[in-house]
Image (cartoon, coloured by chain):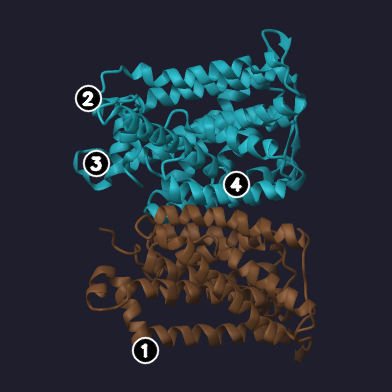
Amino acid sequence: MKASHTMKNRASPFASLLPALLVIGVLVLVPALGPSNRTLSLAISAGINIVALYGLAVLFGQTGILSMGHAALVGVGAYVAAILARDAGIGFWVALPLGSLLAAVAAAIVGVPSLRVSGHHFVIMTFAFGQLLAIVLTNGGDFTGAATGLDLQLPVTWFGRDAGELVPYYFIVVAFVAISAIASWAIINSSYGRTLRAIRENEKLAASLGINVGRHKIGAFVVSGLFAGVSGVLLAYFFRHISPNQFSSFPSIYLALMVMIGGARLLLGPIAGGILVSFLPEMLNLDPVESRILYGVCLIAVILLLPNGLIAGLLQGLQAIVKAAFGSRAETPAAGANNASGARR
Amino acid sequence: MDILIQQVLNGLSIASVITLIAVGVTLIFGLTGIINFAHGEFLMVGSIVTWIAVQQGIPFLPAMLIAILVVAVMGFALERGLFQFTLTRPTNGFIVSLGLIIVLQHVVILFFGPNQKSIPRPLSGVWDVSGVRIASVRVMVILVTIAVVAMTFVMITRSRYGRALRAAVEDRDTAALMGIPVRRYITGVFVLGSALAGLGGALLIALFPVTPFTGGTMVMKGFAVALMGGLGNLTGAVVAGLILGIVEGFSAGYGFSEWTDAYSFGLMILVLLIKPNGLFGGTSGPKMA
């Protein structure tokens, strides 16, 4: 559905935004159901991850570049928020654009040298930069709070009222999830998004058509950095304490895992991945160690059995059922999505 | 000066273990194009198996052989069970390896706990060579690594299996047309790489206590070394391992040990900026149709 330009599909690009908006609409209603504080905190941290996942989805799903150091970019946002609050008394709403911007700058700094090397090596470069950041933060003395990290005390206000409580903060996070979803939808349906997909499908062909592949790859990395920075600021103001190991290699692997489980090429993928990975262990009543084993097994299973992610897999299954029931002429809205994401990695 | 020699020796002993990982990583990548990040966890499993064996009262040497065997069998099972399905799409193989990291790490935590494990040093002697104190266990690690890497090297450059292997790395399809059973070689390289990781794990726990999280840092350094030398290039991996060992040793000798972990990554980024294909030029993995 996102690549409607390639389809005979008559539906306008807006149709592809509807399911995501519908899901976000449902998410807005969640506090009305009186969830427990535990559920609400889990939902908030899932939402914070989803914002970063949308950036990662632009990078991986559209451009076909995988970053294994994405948590480091989230970390840049988080540390910018904490240091601004500590040294300059600058609060949440100003920290948001600044954190986002600086994470994008960090992405550019990592991206320019990393993209000199080809696909396989790039992944390892991002991983190495992520590790380097964790080491720098740990050795940064009082400025970064070393291994213990930093505390954040400034309140979050929302139209002059305190919004640091769970419910108002949940709404703020959902708002940013919505903004991220709409922003990625806009990217996916723009000519810019088409350029990125052209690079994903065939780099040499794209270059021969006059597309500056290197610049667009770095551009996509910078865009994903913008999302990561916002996610970092949200994270810092939610947990109120940040430390280097929150942004090292393993959080990066989990981010990649979430985007992969949800499906990187679908607009609903990040939301599905973020929610599933956050809530599945809670629903199955697993302890952290067991739930991580489950994540790993899920990741392997998804990659081997449903290489386009869970949602695309479900849609494909649904489509097969519809086809079997109504004959091969039945066309579901899912068809576009599957064709768009059908080209296997 | 004495301290410096000691530190360089320490650096080299750790670099030996890293080189063992790098050799496995580089061989597997050269033949399959799969970036196997779980290789560090293979090493960690090797350490844990050694630890269990030594706990049961088995001496170090047989314990090391058991570790090599167990990890080799594990490598065989994982290649047959998982990685062989990702050969046409190496990126998927990479992602599968990320899943494996999490699974292996937490299975070990589930059964043996997250705390660090250590064994008594298999060789406790310390030689005093005109004021330089040399722990014999470190020398043992370096010597074993040199022997094993040399054996691997001779096997790959001299034997007919090695020649077939290099042909398959060069061009998988043509090699297959020449009657080389490429699939079997892929399995074989996975088993060899895993056995080297098992050996590395046994040597590592002889030097330091090991936690379930050790694999993560070690594999990153292994990849840093493999990339520096040129992915797919065996000689490159060995030389880069040597460089890293000396650099880490010197930096510890001059008192910058808290930055030790940063060197491998910093060096790698530097090398790749100057020579994107590594010091000795690597392969870019198998050619895909």
Q: What secondary structure is found at the residue carrying circle 4?
A: helix
Callout 1 crowding tier (Cα within 10 Å): few <14, some 14–19, many ≥20 = few
Distance from label 1 to label 2 (Cα)?
A: 59 Å
- Using the image, tell me which numbered label, if any, was put on residue A295: 4
Q: Residue at x 31, y 73 (%)?
A: B168
Up-down: is B218 above or below A139?
A: below
The residue to which callout 3 is attached is A206
Distance from label 3 to label 2 (Cα)?
A: 23 Å
Q: Residue at x 37, y 89 (%)?
A: B159
Up-down: is A340 above or below A37?
A: below
Distance from label 2 to label 4 (Cα)?
A: 38 Å
Counting residues from the N terminus, which is met first, the one under dot 3 or under dot 4? 3
In x, y percent, where is residue A120? Answer: 41, 55
Q: Chain of mark 4?
A: A
In x, y percent, where is residue A107? Answer: 49, 40
Going by the picture, which residue comes out furthest to the front? A325
- Residue A87 visible: no
Q: Residue at x 50, y 24 (%)?
A: A180
Q: What secondary structure is found at the residue carrying circle 2?
A: loop
The residue to which callout 1 is attached is B158
